[in-house]
Image (tube, rainbow, N blue to C red):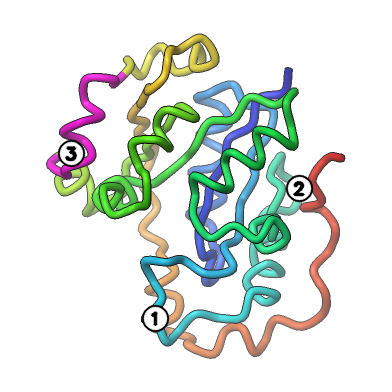
Amino acid sequence: MTHVGILGGSFNPAHRGHRGITLAAIDALALDEAWWLVSPGNPLKDAANDMAPLPARLVSARRMARRAPIRATDIEARLHTRYTLDTIRKLKRRYPKIRFIWLMGADNLADFHRWRNWRQIAREVPIAVIARPGYDGRALAAPAMGWLRRFQRRTDHAKSWTTWRLPALVLLRFRPDPTSATGLRAVNPDWFRHVAGPPDRSGTLPD
């Protein structure tokens, strides 16, 4: 059985913070690899006017994932899924020999109650929440955490996540990286215009 962490996001653009927390999570959770699901469109960001085209974001993610046990993929676009629950269910059906754990930053936990069928997501896969500077207070006080807190597992038991009864949540804390996609876009709003060429195939998922 292969153990895979899933980190979904816009990756607008991908940056060293994504890579750093992913590698740390791979180690903390004893994962074989992680998959970055580069979203074709986040329903909570429909009003955003600075979202780069999917091909550019995919190229950015695959370049940042090079030489690491990370696959950056646009599989959500190919699965035609818009919501996380649908994506997770399709991945579980397509890859029955893989055990998945959902990875999210504390900023996502703060808004998790706004995700469609968020409680059901927690019943489908364990969740690992990664601390993020400036968001931990909001995350721990968030409505979703009020429900999830009863299912929280000890951090020093993180490598045992495949044995947990669902729902299950673990909080992970790594050395913080202040890099943010928002900050990178503020410095270079046209970053995607400089991303040339087709994405490499390093993110191809197993058959």
Q: Which residues are magenta?
A: 141-152
Q: Which residue is mark 1?
A: 48
x then y, percent, for residue 178: 36, 58
Q: Which residue is mark 2?
A: 67
Q: Amino acid at mark 2?
A: Arg
Q: Residues within 10 Å of mark 3 (few under 14, many from 20)?
A: some
Could you tell me which residue is drawn at 37 percent across and 51 percent down?
116
Query: Residue 149 vs residue 79: left or right?
Result: left
- The mark lying in front, picked from 3 and 1, is 1
Q: CA distance from mark 1 to mark 2?
A: 32 Å
Q: Amino acid at mark 1?
A: Ala
Q: Which residue is mark 3?
A: 140
Q: Residues within 10 Å of mark 1 (few under 14, many from 20)?
A: few
x then y, percent, for residue 131: 32, 41
Secondary element at image label 2: loop
Secondary element at image label 3: helix
**Nearest to the observer: residue 182 or residue 179:** 182
Q: CA distance from mark 3 to mark 2?
A: 34 Å
**Nearest to the observer: residue 23 or residue 74:** 74
The image shows residue 204, relative to residue 22, as above or below, that is: below
